[in-house]
Each structure stands twice: as structure tokens, then as C-alpha cells.
Image (cartoon, rainbow, N blue to C red):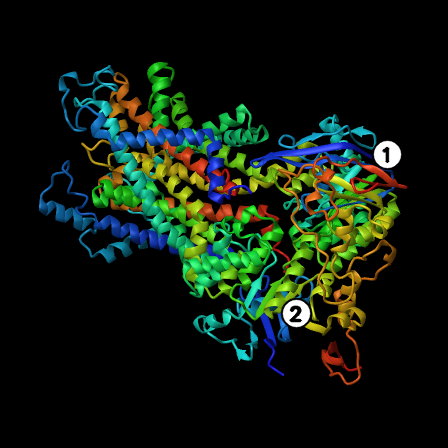
């Protein structure tokens, strides 16, 4: 008799077949490690203006990405920028999932009024442009890390909620749920033991895909000058500064641009790969 | 005589469907089940036969209190469970269980078979975890799946094997009543025979009473003691199984019987098909019946819907 | 020249568990006007055979090989896309199991029948519409005009199945493949559709291939039966002979397991065990693990198909 | 249908008031006012006078009602940062460049994306398909200001073919429109590809093949028509997205459009302008979703003709 395998095992195998997703996962892992061990791999602190005399110098063997206009090692800034970007991405995604799961499960399971209210709430978030709301909220709270996390999770939960709702709705009609009801299981038990475990795929996918959205929002806000306040480095902020020097000192614009593009792309491809692997029916959505 | 283990008294279900057009058009009442009364004596199998839309599955769901009846009562072992709250109902849930048609959606894909079969024990808090697993494995063994299947997942099984697991889960609490909603209609012939035999054996062994819902008269003939035929939400004929096959009185029952494919090419015959209107017009007219169609006894234990005429 | 000529057909699909061998050496010849039933359980390869005959399987991923695969003299293995389109619908058409998903939801039934007619003839729109009305009338639809203007979701399964039959017959094909045409329908509707198909086959003198898992459907409708199991043909012969005197142990077991053959509540003769896993079929005869009269040879070598009577063949080591 | 539309309009009205109230409260709970900025040093007396002239000394609810009363009469007030004109006049002046930029971006990007998506679906798993997937993923994941940056780097800084900014000469429109078109192109390519692949696996496509239709007819008449349905619903909202998406493109290419005012209205506490911009965009989104839903219903016979009972 062959060894028994859970549905997640097959998902993992499908994922392993997806080269782009695996490579993206590895790249993201490397970036993550760099962000975590930033102090160990960078020569100075991110705000240390140790190289004022060499300000704006191009990449060299000492300074892989050159020096910025304020005499700071640019590689250090990029690595610490990953810290900001990733921590915002992950915490926003975490909060998005924490808001989205219960709301989606309740809307999907109970339907009727609960569903109506959640759907109106989602509608509200879909007609208000997130960037404008973010700018307003940013002004309200003077920006900063937590504001951005708040905004990103406020707009990120919608996707998770819709995914969980759809899944719960589909599974609520399944006969194993009926069978559990016939056994006298409470709605709470059914949601906990059957519906949420079966929604694990959309939850994982929703979580991973919320990360790049939050990172993009952070970069956009920082680019507009209302995100993470200097001197804490953020790629969006660095791109904004880099633009002023673009004609003569290309490295100041190119490196943060590449860092942001690669990170966001890797996360998205990883999320796409997970989605295709975990739930083949959601492919391409 | 002891009370029947399950009794349905004048059960009805009306759905309100939105009427087309206009703001204040209101609703149309759709009578899915009308005034259905059934008794299931202890240790017997009762077939509930009809086509899709006849109300047979709705009746099954109401019996399990998975759907609330519009009117009527449900009695388990003489106890009225129609109006019990979920908490009050829970002990009675041990007395009655259900098996569905689609074995694939009947099992949680994320759970191992041992957990699936042990779930009823878990919900009712019977025994410690190891005991629950042990009982589940024994039950799997009883329905013909080796204990080693306990660690497997539903997607690794065939349709017939999954249906065995669903039966194991339904019977692990040793209920008195099993509602079986088309459990064999999605299965291949050879597997169908296996499941029918399994149900027959278990019924004998456990002293079980089964409400067997089906559209397949051939299966019903091999499995049941009595048959009730449903049409348009009402019961139009009920009798001992062989009586239905030898002496069907209602035009709908006759239509169903003639629709069974022949069992040998030499029996091929031309057929006549009645429309729903023709069936309604063809309700038997019997002396002694009432002015409106109602069940009327034509011989002991054989009831047919009839009008005076 | 036979209408359908299939020799040694193999069909497989690569899947995660391995190569699924759906059909393994199927041969089938059908003469004009003949009606043949292919019986088997799910996974026996009966539907795949039909899909392969009309080349409706996407390949890749499916792999099809055969010594011969021709419909009305057209070699379906080497035919161009254009030739395939010419054969389908005109020489051979097909009726599918689930009428609810067989029609394009955004076009009317009429549009879909008319486009079939116009794909194969140069009939004008109005002439094709008239033909469509006549066809719906022919499949005993009482209000052909209103059905013509309906969208699929507005009709019942039985009505759609009639419309699909009308559509399949619209270019007077020489042979109709019916793949479980009544499985998704209610019992009384099923009997009506079977009667309809049988009558139309006689009226139009066309060939019929009835694919089904239900021996009753076979007993009702066809002249000749092919019994498949595990991708192979087990037994083949005239329908009466197969029912009266089955030779292959599988056919016998299958007939014995039909419920409701004799009066009274009773245990049935079941076939123990499971259908073979098509990704990993047993060596030798696919039925040997479940066969009550299996011989040592059965587990090692697949038996060849042999003539066992007039118009009858079987593949079994137990037959001498 | 009428009932549905009226219901939706009511829900839009509700959204409008909820959004206006939230935005209004948020705006005013930000500490400080329009004249607290460093670049406009004014004495307290002057500030009070200015505040009074703009009605900012009134209680909040009165300011809100006053503003909303104006909105109901299409009077959106006077922007603080440019008191010489009304909000309406400012919009009339600043909107056209944004509209040209966004409109041509969508009108070029969307058809291009649809063609790419179609071609990719038809040549599934070829190098072309992978290329389209790569391009569309890039377009969707790289922020638009990064795309703009790359375009400027390549075409202005290195190749020196096109100006990096400005709006006066039409050829200076090329880069911003290209940057803008990336998102709709990527979105449509992705949606079209997956919608077409989705339809191509439907059973009815096999039936169309079995009928002997040519592959061309199957794709262009049946598959496209079915795949187009979900595409319709994203088009209009995306068009509305032009209004906000262009903040970055306009900033990067120094286009004198509406984008700059989004930022400045918040930075300068320009309440009337800020409120008008947000309400306007919210409204346009609401209407766009409504229209898309109606168009979807009109194109989809399932909704147009309802179901059978």
C-alpha cells in the first residue's frame, strides 16, 4: 500500500513544479535574511553620514551601491529599506488576515444580514480610492510606520475576506457540513473545525498577496513624502530623492527602484504560485 | 405493539419564491412537501421513492431537523422533537443519522478517515481521544475498510469506499434510525451491490431502521420492506414493497415502474409516458374515498391516493 | 468498408500519479445502421474510446495510438483539422451526458442548432431555421418555436437533452455516439429519451454507439454489446446472447449484481474488491484480482481476444 | 431590473453620505488649519478673520451641512489654495490633461492587453505565452512611478529621444501615456488570458467541436463572447482609476493635471477641494460599478431572462 498523503502534500508538489514561484520564494528568502541580519552585513548604521566627503560617489568595491547625497553608504540604506518594506508588508498582511478571516467566515456562513453588512462594508472600501484615503489618514496621524500598516491592512482585508467568504459559502453547502449539523455540532464548531481548515488555501494566498500590496502602498506614500519619515530609509522615499539626481547620479534612482521591483515581483510570483498549487480552480484570478 | 421508531405526522414544507416583476409582487408559495405522514417500524427499511422535485429529499432533511418544517410533527421513538432547541435536540441526534448521495462532498477533504469517523464521538464527548480513534478504526473495519485506512484522506478513495466511510460515521453512535438519501445512485453497478449488501447486513446486525430515499426502484426492491411513493410533494401510494411491484394502483407509481429499464432484451416493449397533468387527472376513483384526493386503504397496508367516484 | 473501424486503440494521459492508461488495445468495428452498446464502469475507458474516435481529446496531454482509427473511411489519426471538422457533425455526431453544460450559455438554442446546419451545408439562414424547427419537432418537442428562442438556462434537463439530440442529428450523421445520454436525467425522462433515441435510429437508419454503465439501458436499446473493463474489451456479442449466456466471468458477475432482478428483500451477488487503478493497472487480465475463477496465467499475461461463437468474442484464459 | 437599479441608487446615496461624513470628520480632526503653515505667516487676528470669512469658526456640524447643501446645488466652494476661482473652475482647468493622459492610457493599454491575452491563451505554454505572463505580471506589480522612472532613464537620460517631462508639445505626451498604459494593459492581458482559458475548458466547447465547427468560429464567436462577459466589469472602474492613478505619472512627468492637487489639498488643508475630489471620485466609482453591472446583466442572458422557477 502506498504511503498516505494529505491534500497539502499534493499542493506542495504542484508548487515545486512551478519554477518561477520556487525561484521567487528563494529570492524572497534571501531578501528576508538580509533584512533580518542587516546590522551584520552592512558597514555602518543607516543614518550614519560617515562618507560625507565621498557624497554621491558611484558604486565601487567598498561601497557596492555608492554613496548617497548625504554621505551615507547606499547599500546599507537599501538593506535597511528592505527591513521597513518587509516588516510593513508582513504586519499589514497579518492584520488583513486577522480582520478578513472572521468577517469572511461570518458573512459566508450566516449569509443574510451578516453578509449584507459585510458586503456593504467591502463596497465602501472598494469605491474609496485607497491612496486618497491613505493620504488623508497619513495627514491625520502624521504618517509613520503604524499608520501605513493600519491603512494597508484596512484596504488589504477586503481581498482576504472575499476569498474566505467565497470558500466558506461553497463549503457550507457541502454534505460533510450537513453531516456535522446532523450530529448536533454548533456553528462555532463547524466554522472552527471544518470551514476554516478548508479555507486555509485562500487564507495563505490572501496573506501572501496582501504583502506586495502593502509594500507598494508604503513605497507610494513614502514617494509622495507622507510615508515613513526620514532618516528611516524607505525605498519609495529613496526613489523620490533619487529622481532629483537622476541625470547625473543614476545609482540613487536605480538601486531602490530595482530593490522595490524585485521584492514586490518575487512576493507576487510566490503568491501566484501558492494560489495555483493550493487551489487549482482559482488559477489566473 | 411498540411505538414506531420514527413517525412523521402531516409534515409540510412551503418555500416562498419571489414572484417575477414589480416592486410589490410578493411571493409565490411553493409547496415542496404537503401533508406527509410516514411511520418507520423498528428494524425495517422503508423506501421513499420519487423523482427530483418530488419532495423526498426535503422530507429527509426535515426528518433530521436539518430543515424546519412549515407544519407537522416529527417523533423519534414516540418523543416529539419538532420544536426542540439545538441543545435539547442534541441527545436525540444520537438516535438518528444521515448518509448522503455525493460521497465526495460528504467527507471533509482535510481530515483523515479515522478523524472523520471519530467525529461523532468527539462532538458528543464520548470517551477519550484514543478510545475514539480505536472505535473509529473498528467501525472502519466493520464497513469493510482495513484499519490501515484510518490514516488516509478521502481523495485517496474510490466512490464506493468513501460511501463506506460515510456509513461508518453515521453508525458509530449506534443510532436507531438512519436516513439514507440516495446513497447508491452515484455508484457503479458492482459497487452499488456492495453498498446495498452492507446496508442490509448492518441493519440486521444493529437492529437499525432505515428511511431509504431513492429514485431507483430496482434498488428499492432489493433493499426495502415497504415503499412510499412521492409525487409533487405528496405521498400518492404506500404499500409493502412487493405489493407495489405487483399491484400498483396510482398512475404515477405505474409510470415509475414502466420506466425501469428491462433486465433482458427479450422483454423490450413499447411504452406510454404520462404527463404530470395526465397523472393528476388519472388519480384513481374509488367508492368510499373523499371528495378531495387523499390516501385511501385498498387492502391491508396498501394505501393509494384516491377521490370519490 | 465499416463505418467505424478502430483497431488496437491506446489512449493515455500523463498525471501526477503516473501515466493513466485509459484505453489499452481496444478494437471495434461498426457497420452502417448497426447499434452497439459499450458497457463498463467508470474508468473502464468507454467514454474515452468515443472521444478518441472523434478526436475530441486534446493532445497533448493525451496520447493516442492505434493501428487503425477511421470513421467512414476517413483516417482520424492523420486527418487535418479541417477534415476533422468536416467529419464531426456530418459523418459522426455525439450526444453528451450533461445537457445542462453542453450548450453555450450566451446563445439561444436556435442559434446553436442553426450554426451546426450552416457549418456543414450552404443553407440560408431562413432555410436552416426551418430545418431546426423540423428537427425539434422530430425529437417530440411540442413548442419548437419557443424552444428555438430560449437560452439554455431557461430549459429543463430533459428538454435540453432533446435539443442536443436534435442538434446532433441536424446534418443527418451516419453514426451517433451517445455518451451516457440519460445518466443525468430523472427515471421517467430517461425512459423517454432512450425510446426517442431508439426510434430515431430506426427511422433514420443510422449507426448508434450507446455508452453506458447501466446494463438496463443496453438491454433496452442496442443490437450488439461490447463489455469493457480496465481499458480492455472483455467480451463482445449480440445483446440477447450476452444477456442469456454471458461467457466472461466479469460479464456474468456484472449481470448477477443488478439489483431488483428477483422479488424480495435480499443480499445481492456482489463483485468483491475495487476497480483497477488506471495509473497502475494489475498485470495480466485487469479483472483477475476480483475474479472468482482466476487461473495462474491470468495474473501474468493478458488473454487475447478470441472467437467463441458466431459474432461473439471474449478475452479470458478460462474459456477453451 | 428597475427595482435592482433603484436599490443600487439608494445604496450609492448612502455610500455618498457615509463617505462624506467620514472624510469630513477626518479632515477636521487633523490638528491645525489652513493658515497654520510656515509659508503663510499671519497674525492670530488675521487668521481669525480669515477663518470667519471661510466659515471655519462655525461648529463642525454646521460647516458640514453648509458644505453638503452647496454640493446638492453643485456648488463645491472655493479652494483655499487658489481663492480666485471656484472648485468647479479649478477642475475644468486641471482635469483635461489628466483625462487625456488617463483616457489614452486606457484606450491604448486595454485593447493591447486584450490582444496579448488572447494570443497568449491560444498559444498556451509557448514562449509567447510566458512572455505575456511575464510582461503582465511586471505591469501589475511594479509601481507606476517605478515604470515612469525606468522610461525616463532609458528614453530621456540614456537615449535622449524624448523629453522627460512637460505637457506642451504632443510628443512629450508619449512617455507619460506609455507609463500610464502599462497597468490597464497588464490587467487586461491577465484577465483575458485566464478568462479565455477558463472558457476553453468548459464542456460546451467540446460539444462545439463535436458539431464540426471550425476552430476559428469556436474561438471568435463562442469563447470570446463568453470570456468578454467578466472583462466588461473591469473596464469602467479602471477608466475611473485614471483620476487617481495619474498622481504618480503626473508627478514624474510634470504634467499640469489634477494629480498635484490631491497632494496639495491635503498638505494645505484645503478642505473644499479635498472633499470635492474625494467625493467626486467615490461617486464616479459607484456609478461605474453600477453601469458595469447593468451592462453585464444586459449581455448575460442568464440575468436578462431570469431562470426557470
Quadrant that contains the N terminus of chain A = top right
Residue at (21% x, 20% y) in the render: A67
| Label drawn at residue B45 | 2
Mark 1 crowdedness (10 Å alpha carbons): few <14, some 14-19, many ≥20? some
Tell me the SS state at disc 1. Answer: loop
Front residue (pair B168, A270):
B168
| Tag 1 subunit | C
**Residue C205 in the image: x percent, y percent?**
88, 43
Q: Is residue C7 left or right of residue D263?
A: right
Residue D147, quarter of picture: top left
Gap in Å between the C-alphas at discs 2 and 1? 51 Å
* Whether residue C33 is situated above or below residue A121 in the rendered picture: above
Front residue (pair B19, D54):
B19
Q: Is residue D141 left or right of residue D68?
A: right
Tell me the SS state at disc 2. Answer: strand
Q: Which residue is mark 1?
A: C2
Residue farthest right in this picture: C310
Front residue (pair D190, D96):
D190
| Tag 2 subunit | B
Eye-nearest disc, 2 or 1: 2
Residue C124 seen in render:
no
Residue B307 seen in render:
yes
Amino acid at each position: 500500500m502506498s504511503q498516505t498523503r494529505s491534500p497539502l502534500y499534493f499542493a506542495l508538489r504542484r508548487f515545486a513544479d512551478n519554477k518561477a514561484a520556487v525561484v521567487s520564494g528563494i529570492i524572497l528568502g534571501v531578501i528576508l535574511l538580509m533584512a533580518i541580519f542587516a546590522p551584520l552585513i552592512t558597514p555602518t548604521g543607516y543614518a550614519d553620514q560617515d562618507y560625507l566627503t565621498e557624497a554621491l560617489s558611484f558604486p565601487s568595491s567598498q561601497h557596492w551601491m555608492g554613496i548617497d547625497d548625504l554621505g551615507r553608504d547606499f547599500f546599507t540604506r537599501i538593506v535597511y529599506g528592505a527591513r521597513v518594506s518587509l516588516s510593513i508588508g508582513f504586519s499589514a498582511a497579518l492584520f488583513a488576515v486577522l480582520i478578513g478571516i472572521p468577517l469572511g467566515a461570518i458573512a459566508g456562513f450566516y449569509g443574510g444580514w451578516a453578509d449584507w453588512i459585510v458586503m456593504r462594508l467591502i463596497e465602501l472600501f472598494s469605491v474609496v480610492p485607497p491612496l486618497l484615503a491613505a493620504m488623508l489618514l497619513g495627514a491625520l496621524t502624521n504618517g509613520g510606520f503604524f499608520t501605513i500598516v493600519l491603512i494597508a491592512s484596512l484596504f488589504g482585508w477586503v481581498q482576504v475576506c472575499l476569498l474566505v467568504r467565497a470558500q466558506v459559502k461553497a463549503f457550507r453547502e457541502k454534505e460533510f457540513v450537513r453531516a456535522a449539523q446532523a450530529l448536533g455540532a454548533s456553528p462555532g464548531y463547524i466554522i472552527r473545525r471544518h470551514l476554516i481548515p478548508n479555507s486555509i488555501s485562500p487564507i495563505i494566498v490572501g496573506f501572501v498577496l496582501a504583502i506586495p500590496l502593502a509594500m507598494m502602498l508604503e513605497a507610494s506614500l513614502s514617494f509622495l513624502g507622507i510615508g515613513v519619515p526620514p532618516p528611516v530609509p524607505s525605498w519609495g522615499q529613496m526613489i523620490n530623492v533619487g529622481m532629483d539626481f537622476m541625470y547625473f547620479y543614476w545609482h540613487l534612482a536605480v538601486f531602490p527602484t530595482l530593490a522595490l521591483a524585485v521584492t514586490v515581483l518575487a512576493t507576487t510570483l510566490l503568491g501566484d504560485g501558492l494560489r495555483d498549487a493550493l487551489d487549482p480552480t482559482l488559477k489566473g484570478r | 405493539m411498540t411505538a414506531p421508531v420514527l413517525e412523521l405526522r402531516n409534515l409540510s414544507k412551503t418555500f416562498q419564491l419571489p414572484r417575477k416583476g414589480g416592486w410589490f409582487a410578493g411571493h409565490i408559495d411553493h409547496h415542496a412537501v404537503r401533508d406527509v405522514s410516514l411511520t418507520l417500524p423498528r428494524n425495517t427499511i422503508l423506501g421513499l421513492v420519487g423523482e427530483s422535485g418530488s419532495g423526498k429529499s426535503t422530507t429527509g432533511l426535515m426528518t433530521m431537523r436539518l430543515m424546519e418544517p412549515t407544519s407537522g410533527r416529527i417523533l423519534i421513538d414516540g418523543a416529539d422533537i419538532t420544536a426542540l432547541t439545538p441543545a435539547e435536540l442534541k441527545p436525540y441526534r444520537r438516535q438518528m443519522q444521515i448518509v448522503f448521495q455525493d460521497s465526495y462532498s460528504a467527507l471533509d477533504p482535510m481530515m483523515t478517515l479515522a478523524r472523520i469517523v471519530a467525529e461523532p464521538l468527539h462532538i458528543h464527548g464520548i470517551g477519550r481521544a484514543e478510545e475514539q480513534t480505536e472505535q473509529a478504526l473498528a467501525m472502519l473495519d466493520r464497513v469493510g475498510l482495513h484499519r490501515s485506512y484510518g490514516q488516509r484522506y478521502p481523495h485517496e478513495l474510490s466512490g464506493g469506499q468513501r460511501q463506506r466511510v460515510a456509513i461508518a460515521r453515521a453508525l458509530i453512535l449506534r443510532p436507531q434510525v438512519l436516513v439514507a438519501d440516495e446513497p447508491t445512485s452515484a455508484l457503479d453497478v458492482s459497487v452499488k451491490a456492495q453498498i446495498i449488501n452492507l446496508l442490509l447486513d448492518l441493519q440486521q446486525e444493529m437492529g437499525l431502521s432505515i428511511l431509504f430515499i431513492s429514485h431507483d426502484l430496482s434498488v428499492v426492491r432489493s433493499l426495502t420492506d415497504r415503499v412510499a411513493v412521492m409525487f409533487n410533494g405528496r405521498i400518492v401510494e404506500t404499500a409493502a414493497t412487493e405489493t407495489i411491484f405487483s399491484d400498483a394502483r396510482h398512475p404515477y407509481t405505474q409510470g415509475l415502474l414502466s420506466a425501469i429499464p428491462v433486465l433482458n432484451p427479450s422483454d423490450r416493449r413499447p411504452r406510454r409516458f404520462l404527463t404530470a397533468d395526465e397523472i393528476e387527472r388519472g388519480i384513481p376513483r374509488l367508492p368510499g374515498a373523499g371528495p378531495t384526493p387523499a390516501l385511501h386503504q385498498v387492502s391491508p397496508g396498501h394505501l393509494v391516493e384516491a377521490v370519490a367516484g | 468498408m465499416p463505418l467505424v473501424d478502430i483497431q488496437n486503440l491506446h489512449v493515455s494521459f500523463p498525471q501526477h500519479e503516473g501515466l493513466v492508461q485509459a484505453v489499452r488495445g481496444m478494437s471495434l468495428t461498426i457497420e452502417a445502421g448497426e447499434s452497439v452498446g459499450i458497457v463498463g464502469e467508470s474508468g473502464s475507458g468507454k467514454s474515452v474510446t468515443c472521444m478518441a474516435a472523434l478526436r475530441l481529446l486534446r493532445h497533448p496531454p493525451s496520447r493516442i495510438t492505434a493501428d487503425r482509427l477511421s470513421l467512414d473511411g476517413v483516417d482520424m489519426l492523420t486527418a487535418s483539422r479541417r477534415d476533422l471538422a468536416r467529419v464531426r457533425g456530418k459523418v459522426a455526431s455525439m450526444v453528451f451526458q450533461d445537457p445542462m453544460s453542453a450548450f453555450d450559455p450566451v446563445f439561444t438554442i436556435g442559434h446553436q442548432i442553426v450554426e451546426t446546419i450552416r457549418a456543414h451545408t450552404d443553407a440560408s439562414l431562413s432555410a436552416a431555421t426551418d430545418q431546426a424547427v423540423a428537427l425539434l419537432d422530430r425529437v417530440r418537442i411540442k413548442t419548437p418555436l419557443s424552444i428555438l428562442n430560449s437560452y439554455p438556462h431557461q430549459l429543463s434537463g430533459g428538454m435540453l437533452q432533446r435539443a442536443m439530440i436534435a442538434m446532433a442529428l441536424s446534418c443527418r450523421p451516419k453514426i451517433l455516439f451517445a455518451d451516457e445520454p440519460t445518466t443525468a436525467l430523472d427515471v421517467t425522462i430517461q425512459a423517454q429519451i432512450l425510446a426517442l433515441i431508439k426510434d430515431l435510429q430506426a427511422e433514420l437508419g443510422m449507426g448508434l454507439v450507446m455508452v453506458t454503465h447501466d446494463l438496463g439501458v443496453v438491454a433496452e436499446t442496442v443490437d450488439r454489446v461490447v463489455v469493457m473493463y480496465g481499458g480492455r474489451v472483455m467480451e463482445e456479442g449480440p445483446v440477447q446472447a450476452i444477456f442469456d449466456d454471458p461467457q466472461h466471468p466479469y460479464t456474468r458477475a456484472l449481470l448477477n449484481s443488478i439489483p431488483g432482478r428477483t422479488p424480495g428483500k435480499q443480499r445481492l451477488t456482489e463483485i468483491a474488491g475495487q476497480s483497477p487503478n488506471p495509473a497502475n493497472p494489475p498485470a495480466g487480465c485487469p479483472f483477475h484480482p476480483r475474479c472468482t475463477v482466476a487461473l495462474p496465467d491470468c495474473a501474468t499475461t493478458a488473454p487475447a481476444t478470441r472467437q467463441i461463437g458466431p459474432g461473439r468474442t471474449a478475452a479470458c484464459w478460462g474459456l477453451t | 431590473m428597475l427595482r435592482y437599479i433603484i436599490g443600487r441608487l439608494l445604496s450609492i446615496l448612502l455610500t455618498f453620505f457615509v463617505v462624506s461624513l467620514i472624510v469630513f470628520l477626518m479632515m477636521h480632526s487633523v490638528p491645525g488649519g489652513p493658515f497654520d503653515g510656515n509659508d503663510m505667516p499671519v497674525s492670530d487676528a488675521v487668521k481669525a478673520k480669515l477663518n470667519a470669512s471661510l466659515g471655519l469658526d462655525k461648529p463642525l456640524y454646521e460647516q458640514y451641512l453648509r458644505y453638503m447643501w452647496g454640493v446638492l446645488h453643485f456648488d463645491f466652494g472655493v479652494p483655499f489654495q487658489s481663492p480666485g476661482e471656484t472648485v468647479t473652475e479649478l477642475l475644468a482647468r486641471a482635469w483635461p490633461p489628466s483625462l487625456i493622459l488617463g483616457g489614452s492610457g486606457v484606450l491604448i493599454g486595454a485593447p493591447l492587453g486584450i490582444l496579448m491575452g488572447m494570443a497568449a491563451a491560444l498559444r498556451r505554454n509557448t514562449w509567447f505565452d510566458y512572455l505575456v505572463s511575464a510582461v503582465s505580471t511586471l505591469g501589475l506589480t511594479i509601481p507606476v512611478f517605478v515604470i515612469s522612472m525606468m522610461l525616463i532613464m532609458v528614453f530621456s537620460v540614456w537615449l535622449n529621444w524624448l523629453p522627460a517631462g512637460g505637457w506642451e508639445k504632443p510628443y512629450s505626451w508619449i512617455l507619460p501615456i506609455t507609463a500610464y498604459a502599462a497597468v490597464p494593459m497588464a490587467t487586461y492581458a491577465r484577465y483575458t488570458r485566464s478568462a479565455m482559458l477558463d472558457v476553453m475548458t468548459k464542456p460546451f466547447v467540446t460539444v462545439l467541436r463535436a458539431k464540426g465547427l471550425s476552430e476559428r468560429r469556436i474561438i471568435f464567436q463562442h469563447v470570446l463572447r463568453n470570456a468578454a462577459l467578466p472583462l466588461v466589469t473591469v473596464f469602467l472602474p479602471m477608466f475611473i482609476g485614471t483620476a487617481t492613478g495619474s498622481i504618480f505619472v503626473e508627478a514624474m512627468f510634470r504634467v499640469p493635471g489634477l494629480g498635484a492637487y490631491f497632494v496639495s489639498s491635503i498638505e494645505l488643508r484645503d478642505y473644499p477641494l479635498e472633499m470635492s475630489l474625494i467625493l467626486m471620485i467615490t461617486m464616479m466609482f459607484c456609478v461605474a460599478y453600477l453601469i458595469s453591472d447593468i451592462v453585464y446583466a444586459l449581455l448575460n442572458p442568464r440575468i436578462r431572462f431570469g431562470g426557470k422557477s
